[in-house]
Amino acid sequence: MTISVTILGTGNPLPDPARAGAATLVQAGESRLLVDAGRAVTMRLAAAGVLPPMLDAVLLTHLHSDHICDLNDVITTQWIMSFEPTPLRIYGPPGTAAMVEALLAMLALDVRYRIDHHGDLTWEPMVEVHELDAPTELTIGDATVAVRSTDHRPVEPSVGFRIGHDDAVVAIAGDTIPCVGLDELCAGADVYVQTVLRSDLVTQVPSERFQDILDYHSTVEQAAETAQRAGVSTMVCTHYVPGKAPGDDEGWRSLAAAHFDGDIVLAEDLTVVTCG
Ligand SMILES: [Zn+2]
Ligand SMILES: [Zn+2]
């Protein structure tokens, strides 16, 4: 196994007792990358056997709250569980530095309380932010990371990640409609993780605010078309909108299977997919 992908949270912005928020753990060789940090991310990381100090980097697809709302918990927990000053590396689109700065301001009192209380904790949280100017390529430990722009407008900029190690490649798309950048991320990938919605269900909800989400997410059919066009082996659906009801797997799967003849995984929290 060269790359292991753990879908930490499969929920959408609405609270769901069974689904954490958007977050995916990618273990490439010896390196551990966290993509997005939604609701309850540190709980799901712990369930996957990974504590925040074990992360090599946090990658953010965009700055919507459902993808970053527990980043502060990752920062705090990485800090208080480290026994020597250790920077947490965070990569994200432009705007990430200001957002992290504001999180650190929010945490300032807690940081002071803990430093005052613990004799061996003499440093503040160390965060190293890298803003990404897509398209760009990175190397993080054992992983190569290609960054491409996605289309989640009016949320701009947004990016997706193509993470490689040895011969294995996984594409972590984030929220996006089909676009050139997404096709580049997915080309020939072993695994493609996509946030998806069901337009047939969303259109039945009598709420203007809910209808608004239709124009900036991939439907499950569009995700399947992207997977087919890019020639990926396995498509993984997550971030279900509306939340996937128990017993409704076939409804989601059949819509995807009509457009994609590879493997389709309907992730639950902590579903693991491996490749390579
Ligand atoms: Zn979003
Ligand atoms: Zn989202």
Image: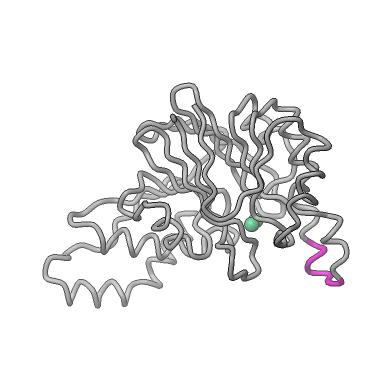
Figure colour scheme: one colour
Q: Looking at the picture, does residue 55 appear above or below residue 77?
A: above
Question: In this view of the protein, which residue sits in the foreground, 147 or 133?
Answer: 147
Provide the residue span drawn in magenta. Answer: 206-212
Q: Position of residue 27 (x, y in %)?
A: 42, 39
**Number of numbered discs present?**
0
The picture quadrant for ligand 1 comes to bottom right
In-image side of 47 versus 15 (left or right): left
Question: Is residue 76 part of the magenta span, yes or no?
Answer: no
The quarter of the image holding the N terminus is top left
Q: Main secondary structure of the magenta part?
A: helix
Question: Which residue shows up at 76% across the image and 56% down it?
Answer: 248
Q: Position of residue 74 (x, y in %)?
A: 39, 60
Q: Looking at this view, name the residue that lies furthest to the left.
A: 119
Question: Which residue shows up at 25% across the image and 51% down it?
Answer: 86
Q: Position of residue 263 (x, y in %)?
A: 68, 34
In-image side of 113 versus 152 (left or right): left
Q: Looking at the picture, does residue 272 appear above or below residue 210?
A: above
Q: Position of residue 226 (x, y in %)?
A: 74, 34
Question: Which residue shows up at 59% across the image and 63% down it?
Answer: 19
In-image side of 160 versus 262 (left or right): left
Question: Which residue shows up at 42% across the image and 35% down it?
Answer: 28
